[in-house]
Amino acid sequence: MATGTDQAVGWGLVSFAGFVFTYYTIWVILLPFVDEGQSIHKFFPPRFYAIAAPLIAGVIGLILIAVFVAVILSASQKKKKS
Amino acid sequence: MTKLMQWLAAVGLFMSIWLAIVLDMISLNIPDSKKEILHALPVYILIVFACYSLALIGYRVATFNDCVEESRELKEEIQEAKKELTEKGYKFD
């Protein structure tokens, strides 16, 4: 059975994903229909970041994965030689 | 057609339609204020997919199950196989 920690982590992931989905949907899809100057706009960063932030995060993530793979490959190469 | 080719074809189709609308090759007379939704659409779909994947992983982690019955069956079958093999002269370490 899934232990208490497993359940906490699992439902935590689910609620985090739900929160991100809701927030991003309101930000990107609904906010253009709300008039400028309404107080709801205070809760969201400028629209530029709605596209820039995921792209930058994606690029950084891909770089990290590439570095990780490179490190692993070079480590296994060294092992073969010795 | 593999699954990869299907996905690539779907993504390519979506991106070409999206590009055609963004570059005004198809004019739908979308007001400028609503165009920013259109511009964010591919990134939005990516984010939605990421959220779905994360939620699915979380759900599967939270509802992970032990297969008690299957484990018992497997152990029984191992015992049975061991017995048969010993009868035929195989020696276990």
Image (cartoon, coloured by chain):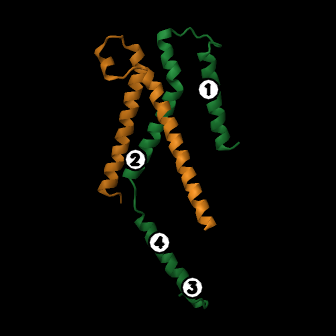
How far is disc 3 from disc 4 in space, using C-alphas? 17 Å
How far is disc 1 from disc 3 in space, using C-alphas? 61 Å
Residue A52: image x %, image y %? 47, 26
Q: Check the picture and name the quadrant holding the N terminus of chain A.
A: bottom left
For the colour green, the matching chain is B
Q: Amino acid at mark 3?
A: Glu
Residue B55: image x %, image y %? 41, 42
Element type at marker 4?
helix
* Residue mark closest to the camera, 4 vs 2: 2
Q: Are marks 3 and 2 on the same chain?
A: yes
To which residue does mark 4 refer? B73
User: Residue B84: which disc?
Assistant: 3
Left or right of residue B61, residue B35 in this image: right
To which residue does mark 2 refer? B59
For the colour orange, the matching chain is A
Q: Chain of mark 2?
A: B
Q: Residue at 53% of width from left, 86% of height from top? A: B83
